[in-house]
Amino acid sequence: MSTTNRQIVLSARPVGFPKDSDFNLVESPVPSPGDGQILVRSIFLSVDPYMRGRMNDVKSYAPPVAIGGVMGGGVVAKVVQSNNPAFNEGDIVEGMFGWQEYALSDGQGVRKIDPTLAPISTALGILGMPGLTAYFGLLEICNPQPGETVVVSGAAGAVGSLVGQIAKIKGCRVIGIAGADDKIAYLTNELEFDAAFNYKSVVDYYTKLSELCPYGIDVYFDNVGGSITDAVFKLINPKARISICGQISQYNLEKPEMGPRLILSSLLVKQARAEGFLVFQFFSKYPEALMQMAQWLKEGKLKYAEDIEHGIENTPRAFMAMLKGRNTGKQLVKVSEE
Ligand SMILES: NC(=O)c1ccc[n+]([C@@H]2O[C@H](COP(=O)([O-])OP(=O)(O)OC[C@H]3O[C@@H](n4cnc5c(N)ncnc54)[C@H](OP(=O)(O)O)[C@@H]3O)[C@@H](O)[C@H]2O)c1
């Protein structure tokens, strides 16, 4: 085992889109676990859009990362030393260990992973937080019904690709919106979405959506916000349900973007409902959702993709690439062997 722990710390608060100099790679000795603690060695690090918000010094649902602090985040790791009776050396676990090669934990919020169920990386994707987000954000907030038209933005990413597939399982007609032609091919050919379009090459989203949704939109799963969402709202049906999951088009803006003020009028005249959610509000129901997702995966009803970068030093690059849309499916960084 190495005696050096490499960590990625936040060196500056990004202004607009993050850059290399906002992060720093530092080294420190690998710590020793105290009473009740475990020492884990990271295998897969997760990079997620929400981390952009944690880099800002603003009040939100979670405190910001301190300047000089290790970037937080979900990690799949191996227990290498245990002074906690709930964990054995060799256990594969998932927890918020952050962007570092080794971490200490008292075991709170740490989940044991069964490596025989699926590849362990899935604990950060389809069988982890993004999978739970897709499951609850679609099923609990939108209650999709057979035959309804579901539109999902950010459709080829970790959450969106699962939302569309769950909607297909529920018998819906699914339209995806994503930012590259190969992503559109993946959605329609591999994941069997009914249609999809590339918002970077289509100029008029409203006309395109009108063509693809001739009977209007019953459910919208919003990962991106901005002008894509403005266009969707013009086409919602009476009693539509809209899940506000993310607004990634806005995360790197220095000033809030002004849009047409149609959204509330659309909700009013269509007697529709838009609801924001944070996945952890469904914490008490995680076990049942994970069981269902694992079952669908086993039955071949759900597929997933992963984009894997290698080396802890490349974690900021992987994070920025994900914000730019280079990933299909879940973006991960592999930092050691299993
Ligand atoms: N509410 C919750 O509890 C919760 C939990 C997890 C995630 N989320 C949110 O869910 C969304 C998806 O998260 P994820 O982890 O699945 O990420 P992801 O979709 O795997 O990756 C982010 C994707 O966003 C797209 N994107 C980037 N800039 C964009 C822009 N200006 N306009 C439209 N699309 C843009 C890119 O794909 P393109 O190539 O398509 O542009 C990129 O691949 C994010 O908004 C995230 O904040 C919310």
Image (cartoon, rainbow, N blue to C red):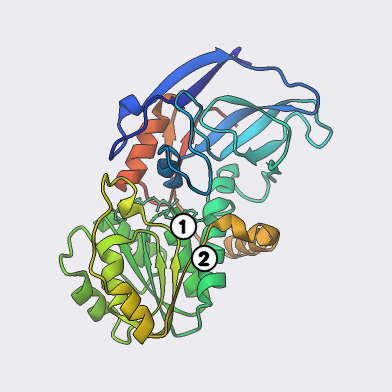
The extreme front residue here reads 59
To which residue does mark 1 refer?
Answer: 159
Does any portion of residue 326 appear in the rendered image? no
Between label 1 and label 2, give the one nearer the viewer. 2
Residue 230 location, quadrant: bottom left
Secondary structure under tag 2 reads helix
Residue type at mark 1: give it: Val
Residue contact between numbered discs 1 and 2, judged by CB atoms under 8 Å = yes
- Near mark 2 (Cα within 10 A), the count class, few <14, some 14-19 or many ≥20, is many
Task: For the C terminus, give its image quadrant.
Answer: top right
The extreme left residue here reads 203
Q: Ligand 1 near label 2 (Cβ, under 8 Å)?
A: yes
Residue type at mark 2: give it: Gly
Picture coordinates of residue 11, whole percent (x, y): 40, 24
Picture coordinates of residue 134, whole percent (x, y): 51, 62
Left or right of 230 in this view: 238: right
Taking depth in this image into account, of 210 and 172 the one nearest to the observer is: 210
Secondary structure under tag 1 reads helix
Tell me the distance, in whole angstroms, between the alpha carbons under discs 1 and 2. 10 Å
Q: Is residue 196 above or below residue 213?
A: above
Left or right of 47 in this view: 105: right
To which residue does mark 2 refer?
Answer: 137
Left or right of 114 in this view: 183: left
Q: Residue at x 43, y 60 (%)?
A: 161
Taking depth in this image into account, of 117 and 276 the one nearest to the observer is: 276
Task: For the N terminus, give its image quadrant.
Answer: top right
Left or right of 25 in this view: 32: right
Q: Residue at x 52, y 40 (%)?
A: 63
Q: Ligand 1 near label 1 (Cβ, under 8 Å)?
A: yes
Q: Is residue 302 above or below residue 219?
A: above
